[in-house]
Amino acid sequence: MAGPILRSLWSSTRKSFSSTPSLFTPYHLLPRTNTGYRAFSAAPATAAVEASSTLNPGRLRNVAVIAHVDHGKTTLMDRLLRQCGADIPHERAMDSISLERERGITIASKVTSVSWNENELNMVDTPGHADFGGEVERVVGMVEGAVLVVDAGEGPLAQTKFVLAKALKYGLRPLLLLNKVDRPSVSEERCNEVESLVFDLFANLGATEEQLDFPVLYASAKEGWASTTFTKDPPAEAKNMSQLLDAIVTHVPPPKANIDAPFQMLVSMMERDFYLGRILTGRIHSGIVRIGDKVHGLSNKDSGVVKIDDGKVVKLMKKKGTSMVPIDCAGAGDIISMAGLASPIIGNTVATAEIMSALPTIVLDPPTISMTFGVNDSPLAGRDGTHLTGGKIGDRLMAEAETNIAINVLPGLSESYEVQGRGELQLGILIENMRREGFELSVSPPKVMYKTESGEKLEPIEEVTIEVNDEHVGLVMEALSHRRAEVMDMGPVAGTVGRTRLSLTCPSRGLVGYRSVFSSDTRGTGFMHRAFLKYEKFRGPLGNVRKGVLVSMGYGTIRAYALMSLEARGTLFINPGMETYDGMIIGEHSRDTDLDVNPVRAKELTNIRSAGSDENIKLSPPRLMTLEEAIGYVASDELIEVTPKAIRLRKKYLDVNKRKSMSKKPKE
């Protein structure tokens, strides 16, 4: 196989990596306000003196950590920070957003720096989920190298291919790190197989000869060690990350930067601070920037380069470990944060006043899914939230589009906004953040964004990797056949018994809402990963993937007595005691048609005691919808009502007569 042969050839030419770490000196931890924004002005001046003493680009190494979901990149970042002496208050220290810690995934890219053997390493932690691919695309231009983390047991999967393609496109030279080699099922032969698969993946993605000559390391991020040779239990003195850090210094080239040229920086990240305004983060392309320098923001427009803002640098900062420290100046090749300009956004250029040329903007993959956000106009509107109007919703969405370049926001009709993104998970995270901030809104089901080329209709196709128990293969393949999926490969999972891995291509519209169905079909034992592949010819209409719904035709409190007779009609989504209104969806019908029901009907009282008057009402547990399940469940004539305390499904038209008249109109 190509992998083991190349590995043996490379081992003779690799340099031996020494392990003499110099510990990172911890800096002052900046205070935080109650809202979570940093108060940067409270840090001591000693950090600024030390940071300003190094303006040598040759000391810098800018590297991103890229991987498939759950292959261990965030845990690896924790170990690298600890190895360099940073104070890590908890596990997954780089996942600073509350939703990241709750869901166990990385949503936004983060950058930090550590010191190692007289070198400064700027490390970028990136998301692995394809829905957050824009986070990867906007930061790979800041680095010269990447650490590709691959699970030694699972091997490269769909999203490994996605993030690797982005890295190779920008000319990065990745290092391959086979993680989780301490697992009992992982052997040296398995690592050789995975290495061969990764080499083939590099070749299929058009890697250059220089990129194909990648070093291979073996690691257990959980136990905190990495090695240049395969081992499952290194000696105690070698149980650290020094060999990986040495490999980064040796393999990743320093940035090509002209420190004598005028200052220019491309903005790659942006956040807001109550005291300093916009905090712009990016890699300095050329020159030196100091506090007090006059700068301006430049934007590439169709008509040419346009100046959008003037000002001066009021604060320079750099992330050190888990703390943000002030610096007095920074040079070309370094990744820093600055404050002083109010208008630049991600993709704009910040430069000295005499420079009127902007750096090339970031090129992103197009969005594939759109949803319409509007005002909540249900009878229960205004009870939970504090931000209710279309103007408030629009301002929040526009602010999100400034910091998340993978999302496009277009004004619609009647105080509504079309939000375009990469997938339902990305838009679901946005909706969840908004409801936690006190917003009430109505959300349409996701719609796929089609293309037309040469008169032919094209749709986004995704590459799907599925791993299930053998007894569930037939059920999964039948469900996906209704969703226009095509099987590309199928075989047993290496190192397991009774597990099958499927590789498929499927239209994005077919995968909307399938994750919850898949989890139910496989009883929670299956794994499914997906990533955008390409636009392809429209594959035709989907099969019947959903039944009808039970629609309320009453207003008030839901009664257990009424639900007792409705249980036989289908699956309920509600509990007794909840509020309902005309047009609200309370369950799934057992048939393909919608059914109007009355869930507020109460038992009539009489003065005659009957045999069944005192019977206990026992109901089956309802299927309570999460936000992600609701996004994938609603049909084209339905909406999701989102409030801080509730998620309800409803018909777009609440009046039953209006719905009947609309259903009789011919579909376009």
Image (tube, grey):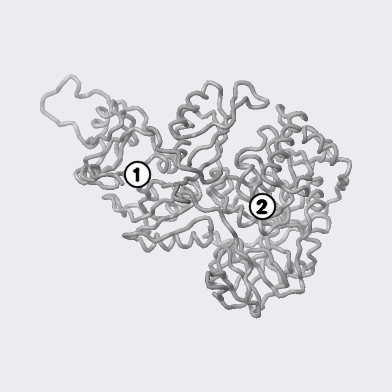
N-terminal label among 2 and 1: 2
Q: Dot 1: what SS? A: loop
In the rendered image, the vertical position of residue 109 relative to residue 533, given as above or below: below
Q: Nearer the viewer, residue 540 or 455?
A: 455
What's the residue at 55%, 49% (across, down)?
Answer: 132
Amino acid identity at mark 1: Ser
The quadrant in which residue 417 appears is bottom left
Q: Nearer the viewer, residue 390 or 308?
A: 308
Amino acid identity at mark 2: Lys
What's the residue at 21%, 46% (across, down)?
Answer: 658
Q: Nearer the viewer, residue 266 or 535?
A: 535
Q: Dot 2: what SS? A: helix
Percent x, y for residue 10?
Answer: 84, 41
In the rendered image, the vertical position of residue 357 relative to residue 133, given as above or below: below
Do the numbered discs 2 and 1 sit on residues whose CB atoms are within 8 Å?
Answer: no
Circle 2 residues within 10 Å: few <14, some 14–19, many ≥20:
some
Residue 376's disc number: none
Say if residue 581 shows up in the picture. no
Circle 1 residues within 10 Å: few <14, some 14–19, many ≥20:
few
Return the residue at label 2: 169
Check the picture and name the quadrant holding the N terminus.
Answer: top right
* Numbered circles on residues, count: 2
The quadrant in which residue 334 appears is bottom right
Percent x, y for residue 327?
Answer: 71, 69
- Residue furthest front as drawn: 454
Return the residue at label 1: 636
What's the residue at 64%, 42% (across, down)?
Answer: 160
Q: For marks 2 and 1, give the CA distance.
A: 37 Å
